[in-house]
Image: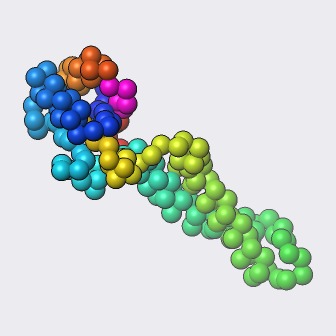
Amino acid sequence: MADYLVATLGDRIQAEAVYVALQKAGLPESNLSIFGTGYKTSEACDRFDPALIAQNQVKRMMFFLLPLGCLGGVIFYQSIRLDVLPGLGRIVNSVMGGLLGATAGALGGFITGGGLKVRLDKTVPYAQQLQSGKYLVVVQDADNLKMRQANRTLMTLNIDKVAFYERPD
C-alpha cells in the first residue's frame, strides 16, 4: 500500500486525539509521530514531503542531463556542421551548439524530473504548513494491515486531509 500515511490537522488537541485513537486501534508508538509545535520539527518531515521530493528529483535530473545535452550539442554540430552563426568559425559555432544542447538538456531534465508537476501542482510543503500552526500525524513503516487499519480509523474520525506516500528511495 504506502510507506507513509499523513493526516494534516488544524490544532494540537485534534492531533493528540487522532494519535490516541490510532494507538487504541492497535498501532504501536514506534510507527506513530506527531509533527508541530511542541512535537517533532519540520526538518524531520523532509523524508516524506512530496513537494520537496519532487524538487530534489528535478534538480537531480537537470544536473544529470545538462552536461549530456552540452556534449550532445557539440557532437551534433561537429557531425552536421550546421552553422548557428555563419561566419564566426567552427569554435564559436561549436560552443553555441553546446549551449543549445545544454539548454535542451536542462529543459528535458525539468520536464522528465516532474518540474511541470512541481510548478502546476500548488502543494504546500509540510514545513510551511507546520510553520502556519498546523499539526501532522504520521503513520510510517507499518505493514499493510496496520496502514489499512489506520486509514479506517482516520475515516471514522472524519479527517479530510489524509495522504499516502511511497518511500522515494
Q: Position of residue 92 (x, y in %)?
A: 77, 81
Q: Is residue 40 left or right of residue 23?
A: right
Can residue 143 be seen in this snapshot? Answer: no
- Front residue (pair 77, 135): 135
Residue depicted at x 53% and y 47%: 118
Can residue 105 be seen in this snapshot? Answer: yes
- Front residue (pair 143, 51): 51
Q: Is residue 41 left or right of residue 92?
A: left
Above or below, 108 against 146 in this view is below
Which quadrant would residue 91 be assigned to in this image?
bottom right
Q: Magenta includes 121?
A: no
Q: Position of residue 21 (x, y in %)?
A: 16, 25
Above or below, 162 against 156 in this view is below
Q: Magenta includes 162?
A: yes
Above or below, 40 against 164 in this view is below
Q: Which contiguous range is marked in magenta?
A: 159-164
Q: Position of residue 35 (x, y in %)?
A: 24, 45
- Front residue (pair 37, 67): 37
In which quadrant will I find the N terminus?
A: top left
User: What colour scheme does the image use?
Assistant: rainbow
Residue depicted at x 50% and y 54%: 58
